[in-house]
């Protein structure tokens, strides 16, 4: 288990309108134990239309949870119908933005170069990119996982030569594990996250010792603790199990308990 402050992020994908989102925050406020949010960083990542309501609800209910966005334009402004800029998200209180999620890569033709330009746009807007990388099942079967991760990480950081570990989160999300109920083993997650940290070490100002590298893919309350036990896994990116506030709180509680049991100080 690492000395880095863990992150648990819940990606709602295309679920919950803003009315449902406000109910969710109210439930989360009840379910989250204060000692859990002092032990780790919790992020909720709702659809764009919910951001304003969720931001207000978190503030009103005094919930110590950060706000994330699922997508952002690579452009800062201009004639780009349908796009949203990082500075617009920052004005709403968004702190983190997913970039390069496999569903954006697959369904919306997001290529490596676009991922790199989008990471740069997120940084220009003052947000922290959560750069998602991961191999497909076919790539894994070919033994190409390490090469795929190296290519995606390099491309993701290509436009931000001066980034440091505090301003980046990397999420290892094997495509075959997302939404399948078949998570990676803790050993596989550790291997991939350690590989990503080694690769990032050469790319980050000051090295990757403080970089948070998360695992994502079929995380639930039952497997969460085992997945964050290895030293290089600094938290979780949760999809399906984040859609219900009670279940998400259980995942958060499992991670926090695991860190507490290991005697980790709750540092910010
Ligand atoms: P899942 O999704 O937890 O439903 O597998 C994870 C993700 O896509 O980030």
Image: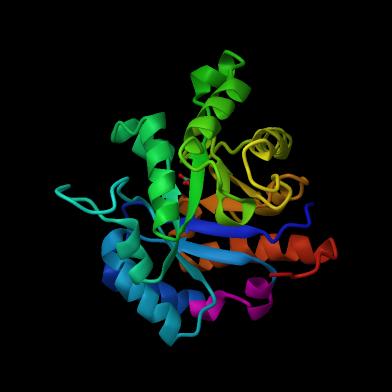
For image coordinates 30% across by 64% down, the residue present is 88
Q: Say whether residue 31 is visible.
A: yes
Q: Residue 19: where, in percent of width, then height?
A: 28, 73
Relative to 246, say whether 202 is above or below: above
Q: Residue 242: where, in percent of width, then height?
A: 48, 58
Q: Magenta span: helix, strand or loop, mainly?
A: helix
The answer to which quarter of the image holds residue 188 is top right
Q: Residue 143: where, in percent of width, then height?
A: 62, 16
The answer to which quarter of the image holds residue 40 is bottom right
Q: Nearer the viewer, residue 230 or 158?
A: 158
Q: Say whether residue 176 is visible.
A: no
Which quarter of the image is occupied by the C terminus?
bottom right
Q: Nearer the viewer, residue 70 or 75?
A: 75
**Residue with the most extreme right position:** 263
Compared across the picture, whether 80 is left or right of 50 comes to: left
**Residue with the most extreme top position:** 142
The answer to which quarter of the image holds residue 103 is top left
Asked whether 211 falls inside the magenta stretch, the response is no
Asked whether 36 falls inside the magenta stretch, the response is yes
The magenta-colored residue range is 29-38
Q: Could you tell me how many numbered marks the image carries?
A: 0
For image coordinates 59% across by 21% down, the residue present is 147
Q: Residue 41: where, in percent of width, then height?
A: 60, 65
């Amino acid at each position: 288990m690492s000395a880095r402050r863990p992150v648990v992020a819940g990606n709602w994908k295309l679920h919950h309108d803003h009315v449902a989102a406000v109910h969710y925050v109210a439930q989360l406020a009840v379910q989250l134990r204060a000692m859990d949010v002092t032990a780790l960083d919790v992020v909720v990542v709702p659809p764009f239309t919910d951001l304003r309501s969720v931001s207000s609800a978190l503030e009103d209910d005094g919930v110590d949870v950060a706000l994330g966005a699922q997508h952002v334009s690579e452009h800062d402004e201009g004639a780009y119908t349908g796009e949203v800029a990082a500075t617009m998200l920052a004005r709403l209180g968004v702190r983190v933005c997913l970039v390069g999620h496999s569903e954006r890569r697959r369904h919306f033709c997001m290529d490596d170069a676009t991922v790199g330009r989008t990471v740069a746009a997120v940084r220009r807007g003052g947000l922290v990119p959560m750069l998602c990388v991961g191999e497909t099942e076919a790539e894994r079967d070919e033994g190409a996982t390490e090469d795929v991760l190296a290519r995606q990480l390099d491309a993701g950081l290509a436009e931000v030569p001066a980034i440091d570990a505090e301003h980046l989160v990397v999420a290892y999300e094997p495509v075959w594990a997302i939404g399948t109920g078949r998570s990676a083993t803790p050993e596989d997650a550790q291997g991939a996250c350690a590989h990503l940290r080694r690769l990032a070490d050469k790319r980050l100002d000051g090295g990757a010792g403080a970089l948070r590298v998360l695992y994502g893919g079929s995380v639930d309350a039952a497997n969460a603790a085992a997945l964050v036990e290895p030293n290089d896994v600094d938290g979780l990116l949760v999809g399906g199990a984040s859609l219900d506030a009670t279940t998400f709180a259980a995942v958060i509680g499992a991670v926090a308990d695991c860190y507490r049991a290991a005697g980790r100080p709750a540092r910010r």
